[in-house]
Amino acid sequence: MSSITEVKVPDIGDFKEVDVIEILVKPGDTVAKEASLITVESDKATMEIPSPAAGVVKELKVKLGDKVAEGSMILLLEASAGAAPAQQAAKPAEIPATPAPAPPAAASAPAAEPAAVPIHRPAPVPLAPVAEAPAFMPHASPSVRKFARELGADLAKVRGSGSKGRITQEDVQAFVKRMLSAAPATALAAAAPAGGVPFNLPEWPQVDFAKFGPVELKALSRIKRLSGANLHRNWISIPHVTQFDEADITELEAFRKESGAASEKQGFKLTLLAFLIKACVTALRQYPEFNASLDRGGENLVLKKYFHIGVAVDTPDGLVVPVIRDADRKGVYDLARELAEVSKLARDKKLKPGDMQGGTFSISSLGGIGGTAFTPIINAPEVAILGVSRSAMRPVWVGAKGEAGQFVPRLMLPLSLAYDHRVIDGAAAARFTSYLASVLSDIRRSLL
Ligand code: CAO
């Protein structure tokens, strides 16, 4: 059975009205779900509005030059048999006027609503593209689409250099050239089927577990499914190395406890994590290549002059990484308050996609739980992440060289810095963690 549905303009973010600049279908066309129907343009971006279902276009309700807003009717669609009824178009996907500097393969932990990218937000670069749908619908003329199809180029991965992000034939050519000359790991990672077996490995073992004992099936949460794919990609495409170190935080911990009363009166804890963020910013200033990303071609380093620190937060549904913006301009009380707020938002599932974007460096602290060291996975396109484990009192040998010394009990904090070896050398990583440890052992250094 087929049914006619009205396809309308979905939520287009902050924009009240946008112009219809392209109509990509005509009556009688058969369209697949997610196929682009029309292109609209605001003063900031162009976006294509995808079809919410598969079907046949019965009648167009817009023409070139029309102004449309949320709820405006686009067309009548006769849904294919078996297709879910379409009330309105799927959320539009933005093509930013100013392309984001980061590569499209940039993600680690999931955004709350990765499929719905409102027009006013930048493309979801650092966090969570959707596994089954592209992060944005490419905007390109039919001839460029045909050209890309012939070369097997995925337009969703091509950044348009034309007006308002439009993809040109030259963009497709440059993309294909880059893919061909990409480092083997990147090319192989890109070639690997989503969730499939990368490289030439034997197939994943298919085992009927129930044959061996009782089992229960539990679906992975949406966050886990999204972050899993991104973690997998980051793990196989970034050459990770982990540098381990320890910081003497005896004095810092005493200072934190002394200073904690003021924050408790205001209803939040002055946590070690706030000091860690502060100390990391100091170290990032000293070693700017840790606060950077590789550019799309992998030939330049984009050094960022801002310090947005991602913090891994464990929630019942999985790991999310909200970003504390401009951490260099905030004091430890402000950082501690903000950490308490974002952790609560994360656990209440109230983080917005934008809250998890734009990070320049991440911290993953398991110190409240336990452990002595671990290897965190880099949150691409960042180039390093600091893992923090549980501090413990340890005997530390204190004594100048050549003089008699003694073991002294000190509170030692284990640090595990995972870094992208394409960008950072082992010596630089060792310098970074040594410097970070020195800042933590005397936090006054963060004032210098
Ligand atoms: N060493 C010893 N104790 C520590 C510590 C450390 N490194 N870090 C925190 N603690 C203590 C705190 O002082 C606190 O003790 P009190 O309750 O006695 O004050 C307790 O552990 C709990 O701390 P917390 O977890 O509430 O606060 P936090 O600032 O340390 O961490 C957050 C906040 C959001 C990072 C944390 O709740 C969290 O989600 N951690 C998990 C992150 C994660 O899963 N990472 C793994 C990613 S890799 O897959």
Image: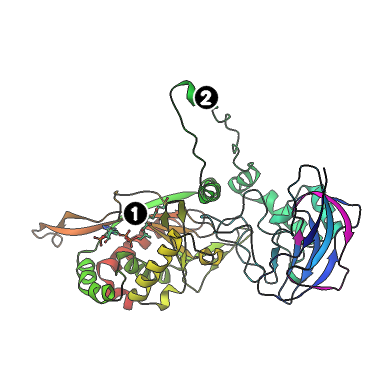
- The residues colored magenta run 49-70
Using the numbered discs, state the Cα–Cα distance from disc 2 to disc 1 in whole angstroms.
35 Å
Q: Quadrant of residue 25?
A: bottom right
The residue that label 2 is drawn on is 208
Q: Quadrant of the C terminus?
A: bottom left
Measured along the vertical axis of the image, is residue 163 above or below residue 150?
A: below
Q: Nearer the viewer, residue 298 or 195?
A: 195
Q: In the image, what residue occupies the spot 46% across and 74% down?
A: 326
Left or right: residue 169 compared with residue 120 = right
* Some atom of ligand 1 lies within 8 Å of the CB belonging to the residue at label 1: yes
Q: Mark 2, mark 1: which one is toward the viewer?
A: 2
| Residue 336 percent location from the top left of the image | 35, 70
Query: Looking at the picture, how far across and down is residue 337, in whole percent?
Result: 36, 72
The residue at label 2 has a CB less than 8 Å from ligand 1: no
Residue flagged by tag 2: what amino acid is it? Asp
Tell me if residue 74 comes above or below residue 211 in the rendering. below
* Neighbourhood count class around disc 1 (C-alpha, 10 Å): few under 14, some 14–19, many 20 upward: some
Q: Is residue 252 magenta?
A: no
The quadrant of the picture occupied by the N terminus is: top right
Any magenta on residue 50?
Answer: yes
The tag earlier along the polypeptide, 2 or 1, is 2
Quadrant of the picture in which ligand 1 is shown? bottom left
Q: Which residue is mark 1?
A: 366
Query: Which residue, as the protein is rendered here, is positioned at the far top?
Result: 211
Label 1 secondary element: loop
The residue sitting at 75% across, 76% down in the picture is 17
Q: Is residue 248 left or right of residue 156?
A: left
Residue 235, image x, y percentages: 51, 47
Residue 176 shows up from this direction: yes
In the drawing, does residue 72 fall left or right of residue 423?
right
Asked if the residue at tag 1 contacts the one at tag 2, i.e. Cβ–Cβ closer than 8 Å, the answer is no
Dot 1 amino acid type: Leu
